[in-house]
Image (tube, rainbow, N blue to C red):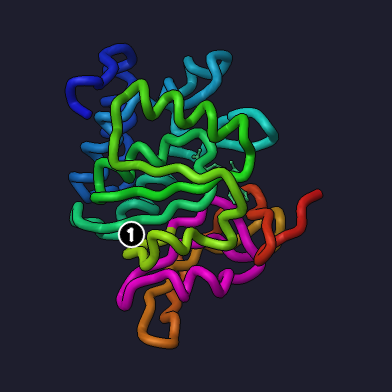
Amino acid sequence: MAAAVEHEFRGPRRRLVELLHEQGIKDLAVLHAIDQTPRHLFVPTGVRHRAYEDSALPIGSGQTISQPSIHARYLELLKLTGNEKVLEIGTGSGYQTALLSQLASQVFSIERIPALLDKAREVIQQIGARNISFLLGDGTLGWRQYAPYDAILVGAGAPEVPSTYHEQLTEGGRILIPLGDREEQTLYMFTRRGDRLEQAEIAPVRFVPLVGKYSWEGL
Ligand code: SAH
């Protein structure tokens, strides 16, 4: 992506990277990806001046782009080496999709709200990431056509892990998913060990609800 990096906001972006480093993010590939990704292009123009604060921001359609420190934590936990095939549920703004495209070899991303997906596609095209495929639809079904995935990242909260994810994961592959109620969740990381999912509790989080066949019903 180097040639297409936006030079605008370089200073604030550097400071965000330093802040994340101070907060304990050590994975240099993750910090580099954040340094190379113009987050301000992924947020609505009205909040663009806040793009490099460590805060969640509204992106329209009642959804939010997560806090950069959450993205950084998420990505660090996956320990990606660059060779992985990754499935992302909840494209939202497409910011995390752009980060993943620099850390994995192929990214498959599903979003259920057409307006968000259109916008995300447009920005991704603008910054020139090519290893991303998008799907409009219900991400609780996964994306069988390209399975199995080395990692499945869910950017919205669910009551439990949709069984489709276990089926579409490689042996040793990881699922990151917030589980809980509609307002508050705990972030879990699951690792596939045959028929079992080994579970690790990570941190309390607040995500928008995952809405779909194997999760919450729509409002
Ligand atoms: N990582 C994204 C998070 C966006 S919020 C970002 O930082 O921008 C979570 C997104 O999940 C929302 O855009 C919401 O519409 C989407 N979502 C919720 N349920 C979904 C489902 N079943 N399938 C696909 N996307 C879903």
Q: Between residues 195 and 175, which one lies in front from this camera angle?
A: 195
Decide if residue 179 is on the left or right side of residue 37: right
Residue 21: quadrant of the picture? top left
Quadrant of picture, ligand 1: top right
Amino acid type shown at disc 1: Leu
Q: Residues within 10 Å of mark 1 (few under 14, many from 20)?
A: few
Residue 215 spot, x, y in % from top left: 67, 63
Residue 8 spot, x, y in % from top left: 31, 12
Residue 148 spot, x, y in % from top left: 36, 67
Residue appearing at x 50%, y 56% in the figure: 154
Q: Between residues 157 and 12, which one lies in front from this camera angle?
A: 157
* Magenta highlight range: 153-180
**129 above or below 170?**
above
In this rendering, does residue 131 appear at all?
Answer: yes
Residue appearing at x 38%, y 78% in the figure: 192
Report how many numbered discs are placed on residues in the image: 1
- Residue 55, magenta (yes or no): no
- Residue 158, magenta (yes or no): yes
Q: Between residues 140 and 147, which one lies in front from this camera angle?
A: 147
**54 above or below 170?**
above
Residue appearing at x 37%, y 26% in the figure: 125
Residue 84 spot, x, y in % from top left: 26, 58
